[in-house]
């Protein structure tokens, strides 16, 4: 039906159309505002938690407060590792506009060496947002004063008191205590693996070797936090809360610092190692590896020249010889061989051989040190005078399997489990070992002739000084074997509670008492009228020992003359001992690299250690400076 | 006698004022004042300045409301011509700020002529359609379109996308209510969509960036996306009930940019929460509904078109502003009506509300 085209009608239709469009607009408005509301509901209700977290993250910065590292003391309370406060000059990069200009300006005021800059750059790359980073450490008082006077010139730079690690005894016992150094990538991975990441925010040092490394998580403590409100510019507006850090736990070692110092001095400038153990607990009284190094060099990031000196020295001061040096035990192996013979029933103490001075086997002559031999030799004499022929024959009679089984039980050729990382295994020779060690089938075969020299501690035999010390302590302790350890107890910094490192026997070897007594008596004989007699002449206690000499260089049958051999190729001198003989309080193994005969250079060191430990006597002419403190 | 005089003054004062419009606008202004205070008190307090702006705005609103629509119509052409002339002057002699030429220096002060067009364009178009009401032909729509396009192009060229959108929208609403055929409307949108790729190439880098960051704000979290990210964090963390007045962390730790001007909604949303937002949007809705009612009841075509355009422009302000602050529209410089700090926008909006009041309170006279 067509509408009439009157003006009125047209105006009405115009109005209708207008009203329709207004209504439409109204609907669009409502829909659009509903859309906004939906968006707001999404943001403010659905995603509220997410955005709250984002806002908090914006607002709150957690500033870690690094805890004080635990202190390490020896068994008498002498401080071996502590912290001291020193002033550092620190820059907060987020507060500085022109970093280069700032460092340049600081350099005019306070000495900033290129290595300081280099270190700062490195720290900057690894740093977190609002951290302040040291550009200089250990400011002198004068430098602090000079900076304070010009402080207004350097916004974002401040002097802070930070704690540094210090080893008051310097190089003494450095191989046992170890050192801390800046955290590197590998350390970070380790921290992440142990899920300690949160606790190490803000920490920039970590134990790298020794006790510092092994007990890192005990020593570190719990990081505290300060919640700081920051604004969009990253400026701290106010502190919200503070969780105090918990200081690391203190460690008390079994080590005797004075004994350690005395023992280290006894080595003079000779390379070597000494491990002294308390047989009844396994506690290590002294752990010497010479030459030593000053761990204080590492604390602050070691300087390149210092590092080169330590790292490139032919004497390898960074090598912990007590744990990582593996040496043939030489004749110090004989008491263990003898005990093995008794225990396996291969020998009785009285059974004697006639020693012509050599032992022929498979067309090869194994010679004794003493030309013409020792004559009639029973077990006692074989140890006291270190008769090789007795042990050539014994080794042949026992066979390699039997020897390896016994020595394995004694802990030789295995890690002792001492509480320092990176201990070496050494080599306990056996047919299985040979199969593992060599690839070619003709090399893998064990020859009976190889067993012969095993009997006198040569051949493939290779043990660490700590293994020899442990074995000696086990014999001294009648077969009750302990894991050697350095930490006596851990003191909880919060409760003061002491957690003893319980000396639990590792294993109890089922030796017959009279068999052990035979060996011990023979070892006492060594020190009274045998190869160790000269070193122990006039001792106020009875002690047992055994000398040893380990070949570094095969002479291929030629007679060994120390003076004719270059120093590096001279034999290593060894000595194992325990004292007092009836109730041993100390057992040790001494090794002097290229020291020649054990009786000559190793035994006197053992004597000095015993004299000091048992009698408090200092060696003549080698007075220990009395600078160690006691609590 | 005195009572009679006072009564006369009161009558004179309120006779051209529309109660609902005044109430809704005042409530929003009150909320705006509180929010401006919160956004600025700890850095650069703008409470007094904004109070003055609002006082001026209310005076302007009242004054404009006194003018009958026929008188308003007379301002149309002169204002339009003046506005376009000023825009041309800006084009040649404008002061360049941040790469955009929007301001004209008058020696003692500087003005932004584009603001004038927000009123002048709908006024002129409404006047134009009103004049040709009797026999609207296609060419009238074409002329109207041209009248709209000239200032729109000049403003977009400055560039000032926000104002261009508002001016363009105001003009388009007039065309829409004047009966622009649906075919043309659909055609226009289709053409706009088709032209989008070309427009994209014509856009300024920063404009393109704003659109890109809208799609993915995290692509440039410290640059262009920063505004959107921080604003959405502020809104989202406000939750249902808000963090409380003066207690917004995003606001007071200065994470929200432009927090007393274009991004003031983020401040409001953070401190007042969803409930506050709902109330605020309801107030805007009431204001708009009242405006549309006035348009429906208006007695002349000019009044209808003007009222409709002003009302939908107001809606456009609100939608574009909140849309951009909450991250569903690109960032363009559009203030939130009666909330954002700033005298110019407030005066323009007050003129708009004043015109609505005038239309509402003068309609009987015209019908008669």
Image (tube, rainbow, N blue to C red):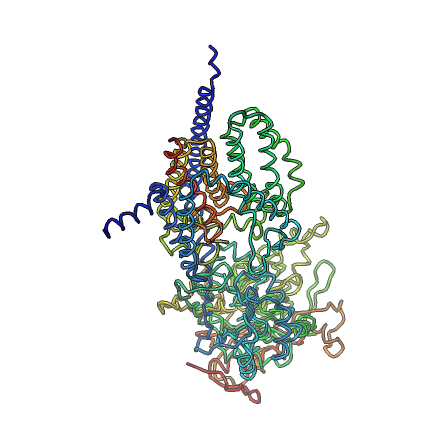
Which residue is at the far bottom? Answer: A621
Residue drawn at x 43%, y 45% is: B64
Residue A472: x percent and y percent? 52, 69
Is residue A629 positioned above or below A497 on the image? below
Front position in the image: B347 or B195: B347
Residue B95: x percent and y percent? 62, 55
Front position in the image: A466 or B322: B322
Q: Is residue A598 left or right of residue A17?
A: right
Residue B155: x percent and y percent? 60, 45
Which residue is at the far front? Answer: B1
Is residue A491 positioned above or below B55 on the image? below
Is residue A458 positioned above or below B360 on the image? below
Front position in the image: B297 or B262: B297
Please identify the quarter of the rendering in which residue A252 is found.
Answer: bottom left
Q: Is residue A238 left or right of residue B92?
A: left
Q: Is residue B25 visible?
A: yes
Residue drawn at x 75%, y 75% is: A565
Residue B133: x percent and y percent? 51, 28
């Amino acid at each position: 039906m067509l509408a009439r085209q009157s003006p009125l009608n047209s105006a009405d239709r115009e109005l209708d159309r207008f009203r329709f469009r207004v209504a439409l607009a109204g609907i669009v408005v409502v829909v659009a505002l509903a859309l906004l509301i939906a968006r707001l509901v999404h943001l403010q209700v659905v995603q509220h938690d997410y955005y709250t977290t984002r806002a908090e993250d914006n607002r709150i910065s957690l500033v870690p407060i690094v805890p004080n590292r635990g202190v390490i003391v020896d068994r008498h309370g002498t401080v071996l590792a502590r912290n001291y406060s020193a002033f550092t000059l620190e820059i907060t990069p987020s507060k500085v506009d022109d970093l280069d200009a700032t460092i340049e300006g600081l350099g005019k005021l306070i000495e900033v060496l290129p290595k300081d800059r280099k270190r700062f750059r490195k720290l900057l790359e690894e740093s977190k947002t609002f951290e302040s980073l040291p550009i200089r450490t250990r400011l002198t008082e004068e430098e602090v004063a000079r900076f304070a006077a010009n402080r207004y010139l350097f916004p974002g730079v401040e002097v802070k008191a930070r704690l540094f690690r210090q080893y008051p005894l310097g190089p003494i016992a450095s191989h046992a205590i170890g050192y801390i150094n800046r955290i590197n990538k590998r350390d970070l991975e380790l921290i992440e693996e142990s899920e300690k990441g949160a606790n190490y925010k803000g920490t920039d040092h970590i134990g790298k070797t020794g006790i510092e490394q092994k007990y890192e998580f005990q020593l570190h403590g719990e990081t505290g936090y300060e919640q700081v409100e920051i604004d969009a510019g990253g400026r701290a507006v106010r502190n919200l809360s503070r969780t105090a850090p918990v200081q690391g736990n203190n460690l008390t070692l079994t080590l005797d610092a004075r004994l350690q110092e005395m023992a280290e001095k006894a080595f003079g400038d000779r390379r070597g190692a000494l491990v002294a153990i308390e047989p009844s607990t396994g506690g290590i009284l002294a752990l010497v590896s010479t030459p030593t190094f000053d761990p204080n060099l590492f604390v602050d990031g070691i300087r390149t020249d210092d590092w080169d000196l330590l790292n490139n020295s032919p004497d390898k001061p960074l090598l912990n010889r007590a744990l990582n040096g593996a040496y043939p035990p030489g004749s110090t192996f004989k008491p263990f061989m003898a005990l093995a013979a008794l225990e396996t029933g291969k020998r009785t103490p009285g059974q004697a051989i006639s020693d012509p001075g050599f032992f022929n086997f498979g067309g090869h002559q194994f010679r004794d040190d003493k030309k013409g031999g020792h004559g009639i030799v029973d077990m006692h004499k074989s140890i006291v005078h270190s008769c090789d022929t007795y042990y050539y024959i014994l080794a042949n009679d026992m066979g390699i399997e039997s020897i390896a089984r016994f020595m394995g039980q004694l802990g030789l050729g295995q890690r002792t489990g001492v509480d320092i990382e990176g201990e070496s295994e050494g080599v306990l020779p056996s047919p299985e070992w040979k199969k593992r060690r060599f690839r070619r089938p003709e090399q893998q075969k064990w020859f009976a002739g190889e067993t012969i020299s095993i009997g006198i501690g040569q051949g493939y035999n290779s043990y660490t000084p700590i293994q020899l010390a442990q074995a000696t302590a086990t014999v001294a302790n009648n077969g009750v074997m302990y894991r050697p350890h350095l930490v006596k107890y851990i003191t909880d910094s919060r409760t003061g509670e002491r957690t003893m490192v319980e000396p639990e026997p590792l294993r109890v070897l089922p030796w017959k008492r009279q068999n052990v007594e035979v060996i011990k008596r023979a070892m006492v004989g060594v020190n009274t009228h045998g190869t160790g007699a000269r070193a122990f002449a006039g001792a106020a206690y009875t002690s047992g020992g055994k000398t040893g000499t380990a070949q570094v260089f095969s002479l291929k049958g030629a007679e060994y003359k120390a003076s004719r051999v270059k120093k590096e190729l001279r034999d290593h001198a060894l000595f194992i001992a325990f004292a007092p003989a009836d109730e041993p309080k100390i057992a040790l193994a001494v090794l002097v690299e290229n020291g020649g005969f054990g009786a000559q250079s190793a035994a006197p060191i053992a004597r000095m250690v015993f004299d000091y430990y048992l009698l408090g006597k200092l060696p003549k002419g080698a007075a220990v400076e009395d600078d160690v403190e006691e609590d | 006698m005195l009572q009679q005089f006072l009564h006369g003054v009161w009558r004179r004062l309120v006779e051209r004022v529309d109660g609902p419009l005044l109430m809704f606008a005042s409530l929003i202004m009150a909320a705006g004042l509180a929010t401006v205070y919160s956004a600025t008190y700890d850095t650069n307090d703008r409470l007094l300045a904004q109070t003055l702006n609002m006082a001026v705005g209310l005076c302007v609103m009242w004054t404009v409301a006194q003018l009958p629509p026929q008188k308003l119509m007379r301002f149309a052409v002169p204002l339009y011509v003046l506005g376009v002339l000023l825009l041309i002057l800006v084009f040649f002699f404008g002061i360049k700020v941040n790469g955009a030429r929007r301001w004209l220096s008058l020696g003692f002060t500087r003005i932004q002529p584009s603001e004038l067009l927000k009123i002048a364009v709908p006024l002129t178009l409404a006047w134009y359609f009103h004049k040709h009401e009797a026999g609207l032909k296609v060419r009238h729509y074409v002329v109207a379109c041209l009248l709209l396009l000239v200032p729109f192009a000049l403003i977009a060229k400055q560039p000032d996308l926000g104002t261009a959108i508002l001016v363009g929208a105001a003009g388009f609403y007039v065309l829409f209510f004047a009966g622009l055929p649906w075919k043309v409307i659909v055609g226009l949108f289709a053409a706009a969509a088709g032209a989008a790729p070309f427009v994209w190439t014509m856009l300024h880098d920063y404009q393109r960036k704003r659109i890109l960051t809208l799609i993915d704000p995290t692509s440039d979290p410290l640059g262009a996306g920063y505004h959107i990210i921080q604003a959405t964090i502020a809104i989202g963390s406000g939750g249902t009930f808000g963090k409380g007045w003066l207690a917004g962390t995003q606001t007071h730790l200065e994470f929200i940019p432009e927090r007393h001007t274009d991004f003031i909604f983020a401040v409001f949303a953070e401190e007042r929460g969803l409930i506050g937002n709902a109330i605020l949007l309801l107030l805007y809705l009431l204001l708009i509904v009242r405006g549309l009612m006035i348009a429906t009841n208006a007695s002349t075509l000019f009044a209808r078109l003007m009222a409709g355009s002003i009302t939908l422009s107001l809606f456009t302000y609100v939608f574009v502003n909140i849309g951009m602050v909450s991250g569903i529209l690109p960032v363009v410089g559009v203030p939130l009506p009666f909330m954002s700090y700033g005298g110019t926008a407030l005066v323009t909006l007050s003129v708009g509300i004043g015109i609505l009041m005038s239309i509402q309170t003068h309609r009987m006279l015209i019908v008669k």
